[in-house]
Image (spheres, grey):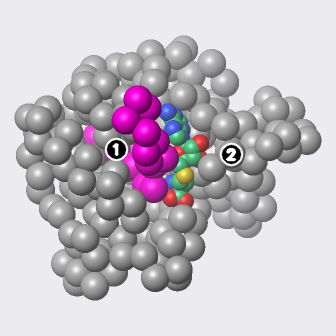
Amino acid sequence: MRLKNVPGARDAIEKSDICIKDPERFKGKWKSEIFKNDNPLHIEIGMGKGRFIMELAAKNPDINYIGMEMYSSVIYRGIQKYEAEENPPRNLVFLCFDATDITEVFDTEEIDRIYLNFSDPWPKDRHAKRRLTSDRFLKKYDVILNKSGHVEFKTDNVSLFDFSIDSVKENGWNIDGLTRDLHHDDVMNKGNIMTEYEQKFSEAGNPICKLVFSR
Ligand code: SAH
């Protein structure tokens, strides 16, 4: 998702309290300095316009949430949505940041859960390392994720899903849950929160795949 040249996006990010600037400052200190509690910390990488993480945060006030998105034009939409809420969740912040450098922002085992929703498929082989379930990213998640934590990944892209299953297994992670038709899987769909892309793609008739994995 990339929205070109949204006027005012960078300025709005600068002014917004919900969007944390220079996040490297808080490495190892997210709970104590940003959330000021000791609740679990869950992040979404590639939050897009943020519908999923906003709804999740509102439902789970005892969990801290961080939504990460690399494009200012996209995160700007999330900020607008957050600021338009009458009672926006206080257990949520946003980072305009590229997850390639995620270990600069989070310390060893600082995170309790990672959500990846409808990550860019990068279909060309030569771009495979940019996929958020590639070897390169799994090694970084292995550092920042608590040993008892897990990753939840949803996509409608079957090639990316198959690639991800192989990648996860090759990197020694365990598969805790797998479905190729989430919305017809009563167990895995329980409490499911739809993302913007999930709504769009399922309305177009694409089944949604979901993978849960841990070490
Ligand atoms: N999760 C949303 C958006 C999916 S589109 C939804 O399901 O509706 C994927 C999003 O991930 C895009 O907005 C893209 O900019 C973001 N993204 C891709 N690679 C990223 C990276 N390395 N770091 C942070 N965000 C990334």
Q: CA distance from mark 1 to mark 2?
A: 22 Å
**Residue 206 in view, yes or no:** yes
Q: Position of residue 125 (x, y in %)?
A: 37, 35
Residue 79 magenta: no
Q: Is residue 137 left or right of residue 53?
A: left
Q: Which residue does the image show at 67% across and 37% down from the upper left? A: 71
Name the residue carrying label 2. 2
The vertical placement of 103 against 95, above or below, is: above
Residue 117 magenta: yes
Q: Amino acid at mark 2?
A: Arg
Q: Is residue 173 left or right of residue 10?
A: left
Element carrying mark 2 = loop
The vertical placement of 204 against 178, above or below, is: below
The answer to whether the residue labelled 1 contacts the one labelled 2, judged by CB atoms less than 8 Å apart, is: no
Q: Is residue 37 left or right of residue 79?
A: left
Q: Give whichever of discs 1 and 2 has the lower sequence position.
A: 2
Q: Which residue does the image show at 73% across and 66% down from the upper left? A: 86
Q: Which residue does the image show at 45% across and 24% down from the upper left? A: 100
Q: Position of residue 104 (x, y in %)?
A: 44, 16
Name the residue carrying label 1. 114
Q: Amino acid at mark 1?
A: Ile
Element carrying mark 1 = strand
From this viewpoint, which residue is outermost toward the right? 7
The vertical placement of 87 against 94, above or below, is: below
Determine crowd level at label 1: few under 14, some 14-19, many 20+ residues with C-alpha closer than 10 A.
Answer: many
Magenta-tinted stretch: 112-127
Q: Quadrant of residue 172?
A: top left
Q: Position of residue 198 (x, y in %)?
A: 48, 69
Q: Is mark 2 within 8 Å of ligand 1?
A: yes
